[in-house]
Each structure stands twice: as C-alpha cells, then as structure tokens.
Amino acid sequence: MVKPLKFYLSLLLARASYCGIKLLTKSSGTSFAGKMVLKFYPEFLANCPDYIKNDIVTVTGTNGKTTTSGLISHIIETDGYSVIHNLKGANMLTGVANVFALEVSPLKSFDYAVIESDEAYLRKLYDYIRSDYLVVTNLFRDQLDRYGELATTAGFIKEAIDKNPNLKLVLNADDPLVATFNRTEYAVYYGFDSVEYDCNYQHDSNAPSEVFNCACGDPLLYSKRFFAQQGHYYCRKCGYKRPVCDYSASAKIYADFSELTVSHKENVYKFKVYLSGLYNAYNALAAIALAMEAGISHVTIQDALNTYKSIFGRTETREIKGHKALIQLIKNPTGASEVLKTVDLESNIVIAINDNYADGRDISWLWDSDFEQLRDAKKLVITSGIRANDMALRLKYAGISQSQIVVEPSIKKAIEIAAASGDKDENITILPSYTALLKIAKMKF
C-alpha cells in the first residue's frame, strides 16, 4: 500500500528532531519527535499498523503497565520475533508516535507491536490503531486532578474497548473493576488462588482500602483479599462474584523473586520471576497469560523471565558510588504502599517527590500511602524534590524519628548524602515520583 507523502516526510522529520533534541539537551527524547510528527501529520499513527506483520498488543491499567509490557515484549523477542515497543514508558499518543516514527522505515517492519497505553489515551489510540490483544492490569485511584475518580477511568477503557470489537481481552479477575470489561466475544481472565510469603516483608497494610460497590449498589465482600481491592470478591445481594480464571495461579513471594504455579486447561506450569513483590507477580502473571494466548511455550516464557532486565525505576538496581541502589517508582496510594512493604529498612532511603503535571499536581496520595511501613527504618530517610517538606511532614506523622529525617530539595545532593558512607555494604533505596525518576536517569555520580 502506497503511503501519503506526508507519512514518509514524517519519518525524516522525526529523525531530524530526535537528533536535534539529543544534541541540544541530551534528553532521552521519549516524546519530542512524536509531538513534532503528530503536529505535522495528525493521521501518522493510522499508517503504522501496516508495518506490523502479526499482532498488536496493547497494555493499560493504573500500575504495572511498563513492567507488564516490557515482559511481554521480551518474551516475544525470546521466541525469535522482532518487536516494536515503547520501552521507556512514554504512553500517550506522542510517546507511541515517537517510537513508530523512529523505528519504522519504508523497508523495515516488525513481527509484533507491544504498546503501553495511558488509560485515558487508549480510546484515542484506538481511533488510529486496531489492537489484536488488550491486557488490563488493574485500576487504582491515581492522579485525581488529571483523571477523576475510578469510574471515570473505567469509562475511558470501556469506551476504547467498544471501538475495537474484535479485541481479545486479557483481564485481571482479582480486580472487581477490570473484571467488568468483558465486552467483546473473546476474553480470558488471570488471577491468584493463593499467595504465600517467605520473606520479612510487612504483608499487612496501614493504608486505607477502596470500598467497592457491586453494580447493584451493595458493597462487595471478600473471601480472600491480597492487597487493595484485589482478591476473591462477591456480592451477597445479586450474586456477582470474581470470574473463574483461565490462568489461575498460586504465588510464593520471596525477598527478591517469586515462584508462580499457573494452571491452564488442566495443565500446570511452574515459573520463577526475578522481580520483588506481589505486585510484580501480578505483572508477570499477566504477561504469562498473554504469551500463552499467543501460542508461546512455557519453556520460552521461563527463558525470557530468566533474562528479563527491569526497566529503569521499576525494581531496577544501579551502583552509585560503590553502593547498590534499588530504584522503585511510586506514584499513587496502592502502588506506593506495595513498594513500601518491600523496602530494605537497613538501607539509607531517599524519597523524591515532585508535583509536575506528569506526576499529578495533587499530592494528597502521600497521606493515603503506607509510609508507616518505614517506622522501623534503621538509617536516614532523606526527602527531596519539589515537595520535600511535605514528604518530611508525612514521615513525621508516620512515626519516623525526626532525627532520621533529612530534607534536601536537590535530588542529586539527597542521593549523594545517602551514598556518603564509606561502608560499601550499605545499600540505598530510592523512591521517586515520575519526573524525579526521569531526572535521576540522567544523573552521573
């Protein structure tokens, strides 16, 4: 199919603008070229599916999009196929356009596309790209100033699904909102039957949980609740309950990895996932379900899990001045609370909070996040970023000793304080909001 001249010119514009932004600012350029391309040719994305030979996979949800899509992409690549993927998590239209504009060419196509999409932008993405699969991870309260309440976000995703009637859905059965998205002819569910811990994490949370009502108006009850609203729910009034899982799993959570036993069509598969926390076990299970739906063998999936490297800021480790530093993004109450359960309380801790647009201007989520998990921290807890003082106040109310709290608005200086010890066995934990994470990615120590 012959493309409009503007499409080919867009590819040239993207490459020129990307080179320019790298040269002038040393930015990673995750959206700039896409922004330029969409301004020059708004229909650019509608031409991109022609460069994908097989399936297009989209991934959305509040938490876990970047890790889940990264796992899916890596599994497909391990199976021997080429994948175009917005790896760095730029998940609005400009970010998706960015990766296509820089990667495709008139003579270059890919076997698969794996696209992480912001929940609110999925419906806009589907105006241009028809996806074969949609994986939905979860829906938690997130950035109220941008998206509003959960019902609004759920409405965005349902609207997107309705635009794409042939979509194959891979849904988290343990999330009562996500489970209602079965709006196409083909949907499969994944979820956990049981979760066991073999580590010193604080499994209980002090953070408030959302109260979910059934469509009939009665509150949902739980026979098992894993975290937030995730679990085995039912309605006593109308009988609505968690759907039967096509990919049903049990999880054993260790300090640095998890073991998953997954049942599917009377077959049982065992997987080892080298990521910490139950939230990452959910991400891995979503990726496993999608991969098996796409016909990829469990052997290949485990090979991919063995070699997967975390995307920056998603349980990613880095060496800073000889110290091992673990970097974990926090951005909303549920995600932050789950990350806080896994924090090494023997480490120096840096919490860097900004309130730029991409972070969400409303920082009330700090008060709903379970920072009480840090009460037994043994070393410094350093607050940084634009909202360093607000974070320090939150820690004071969480019961952390004021003698341990250090306020340093400069993120680089805060990390340097955490790395000042001559004992290289002292680890560092860094918990940044989104734009703080982007700053840290560019820092050299």
Image (cartoon, rainbow, N blue to C red):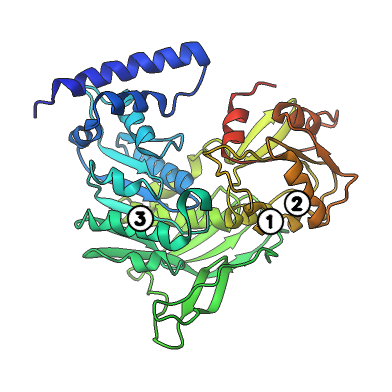
Question: In the rendered view of the protein, which quadrant contains the C terminus?
Answer: top right
- The residue closer to the viewer here, 5 or 329, is 5
Percent from the top left, x then y, of residue 364?
64, 53
- The residue that disc 2 covers is 394
Which residue is located at x 32 percent, y 20 percent?
14
Question: Which image quadrant is residue 46 in?
Answer: top left
Percent from the top left, x then y, of residue 170?
34, 59
Which residue is located at x 19 percent, y 33 percent?
47
- The residue closer to the viewer here, 123 or 315, is 123
Which label belongs to residue 367? 1
Callout 3: SS: helix
- Camera sees residue 370: yes
Disc 3 or 2, which lies upstream in sequence? 3
Q: How far apart are marks 3 and 2 (CA)?
A: 32 Å
Query: Given contact means CB atoms under 8 Å apart, are the residues at marks 3 and 2 in contact?
Result: no
Q: Is residue 196 left or right of residue 241?
A: right
Which residue is located at x 19 percent, y 56 percent?
166
Q: Classify 420 as above or below 190.
A: above
Q: How far apart are marks 3 and 1 (CA)?
A: 27 Å
Percent from the top left, x then y, of residue 119?
40, 50
Q: In this view, does 142 lie to the left or right of 412?
A: left
Percent from the top left, x then y, of residue 77?
35, 38
- The residue closer to the viewer here, 241 or 156, is 156
Which label belongs to residue 327? none
Q: Is residue 248 left or right of residue 202?
A: left
- The residue that disc 3 covers is 156
